[in-house]
Image: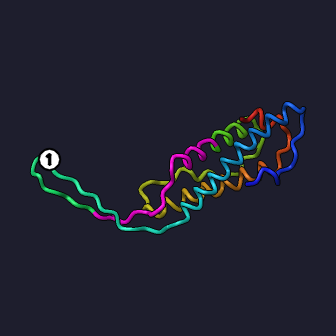
Amino acid sequence: MSIVNLPALTGTEKQVKWAEDIRLDFARILDTLADGADILADMTTAPWTTSSTDPMTGEVHTRTRDRFTRELEDKHRDSLRMFGALYDSLEREHVLEKKWEQISNVIFDQPQAEIRRGTHKVYVLAREYLADLLERETKAKFYIDHR
């Protein structure tokens, strides 16, 4: 998201300067969430082979299974955690109505593809929510209070 397209912030000159830096950090989180959603939308798989040697018998065991070709990195998981912390603080302070359905509790005994689809939905919703927040929130104090 380009910070240039966002509405101007209101507040004292010092507040606005500080809040612009914080809002830029939020925009970076938004970009990382978008990248994570793109990765999770890619359902391409390729065979992946692992081998291990039994220390008792020396027998080599080989296992091949399909694996997604693109996976999330730590930066993607971190951005979702940062978004979650912001969302929780807003909800606790009653700054917003709870309108983001909690779908992050994906049941892990589902097939990997279903888990990936559920996680993709979490990233998409987080990205949409944060984009909306950045476009509508113009008070510098808001960003300072929720850094």
Considering depth in this image, is 20 or 63 the residue closer to the camera?
A: 20
131 versus 69 height, above or below: above
Mark 1 is on which residue type?
Answer: Pro
Whether residue 33 is in magenta: the answer is: no
Residue 86 place in picture, x, y as percent: 68, 40
Whether residue 72 is in magenta: the answer is: yes
Residue 132 place in picture, x, y as percent: 77, 53
| Residue at the spot 77% in from the left edge and 44% down from the top edge | 96
Element type at mark 1: loop
Q: Which residue is mark 1?
A: 55
Q: Count neighbours of disc 1 (C-alpha within 10 A) and say few if under 14, some if 14 to 19, many if 20 or more.
A: few
The stretch of residues the image draws in magenta is: 64-82
Q: Residue furthest left?
A: 57
The N terminus: image quadrant:
bottom right
62 versus 145 height, above or below: below
117 versus 22 height, above or below: below
